[in-house]
Image: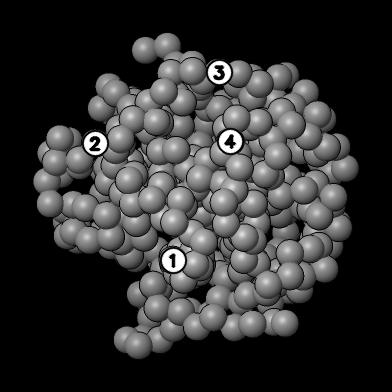
Amino acid sequence: MKLTRRHFVKMAGVTAVGAGLFGLAGLTAGCGEAKSAAVNSSADAAEKVAGEKAKVYFTKNIDAEHLIQLYDKVNADISGKVAIKLHSGEPHGPNIIPPSMVKPFQAHIPNSTIIEANVAYGGARSTTARHRETLKINGWDFAPIDIIDEEGSVNFPVNGGLHLKEVAMGSHLANYDSLVVLTHFKGHAMGGFGGSLKNIAIGCASGDLGKLQVHGVKDYGKWVLGGLFMELMADSGKAICDHFGKNITFINVMRRMSVDCDCAGTSAAEPTMADIGALASTDILAIDQASIDLVYAAPDSKDLRERIESREGLRQLSAMDELHMGNKNYELISID
């Protein structure tokens, strides 16, 4: 099957298909039972005490100074060679985290490199050469950039996954000791929303293989939508979280929250809700749950909520919970 950006966008715009069409009847947004007991390979999750809450730090100020303050709250286990995963955007994309904001943040993290992976749908980021041109256009020329699938893929195992046993990640990802996940939180045409899970689950998968696995193309012969897609993302994210263990941390930046992902570039819908702030945690489920809760509490979030629910996006959260990837119960701690 030849994948093009036009086909990808067309498929993304289709109303999400019920998970029951893929043999997963009964799984809906935000609820459902796991097909089988997931293997919990996370020592932290295994030791989680009933009633314990994850710490999620929050600021209403979105600037480099506060990103650094957030990072310093959660960076205790970040060491060695550090990868910073962010969405660098399609050419001239209006909603990405500004490179001018990321520049001092990256400089604050010793031995750090910004990482990206090529896309599966064609266009300006489909090859390493095109991708590097787009990086220059968008202003990502202040730091080393590693296109992690430039030299192919490496399989990361999915321990106790809902569907996948392994996912092909960009091979260079295995060269890093720690991962800092710097995410522009926003809507997503297929996922409903793009938080920390989407940033790594799709963003670190190789363009020629891994992204097809996460989108269900390799295993299911078609683009999958709805709850099944959320479960595939959770599987992929679990592989990465298990690989890095404690040496991973997450920051969600809630600004210019279009209903569309940064992969939509200049065609992304203009945001219809106000910026909220930024969050940081060592817990991927807690930070995405907290971000969703902030969206749902916002009085101007109608469009984004409709996007999330029409794609069964909340299934991302319950799937991560079933895979024991983190704690949905959190304490929101303001640093302001």
| Snapshot colouring | one colour
Give the mark toward the camera: 4 or 3.
4
SS type, badge 2: loop
Q: Which residue is mark 4?
A: 268
Q: Amino acid at mark 4?
A: Ala
Q: Amino acid at mark 1?
A: Tyr
Does the rendering let one see residue 212?
A: yes
Which residue is depicted at the point 24% across and 36% down? 17
Give the mark toward the camera: 3 or 1.
1
Q: Is residue 120 above or below residue 329?
A: above
Q: Amino acid at mark 3?
A: Gly
Across and down, in percent, residue 202 comes to 49, 40
Q: Looking at the image, is mark 3 or mark 2 earlier in the sequence? A: 2
Q: Amino acid at mark 2?
A: Val
Which residue is depicted at the point 65% across and 67% down? 277
Q: Looking at the image, is mark 3 or mark 1 earlier in the sequence? A: 3
Compared across the picture, whether 327 is left or right of 79 comes to: left
SS type, badge 4: loop
Q: Which residue is mark 3?
A: 122
Residues at marks 3 and 1, CA–CA distance in whole angstroms: 34 Å
Across and down, in percent, residue 302 comes to 44, 56
Compared across the picture, whether 316 is left or right of 228 comes to: right
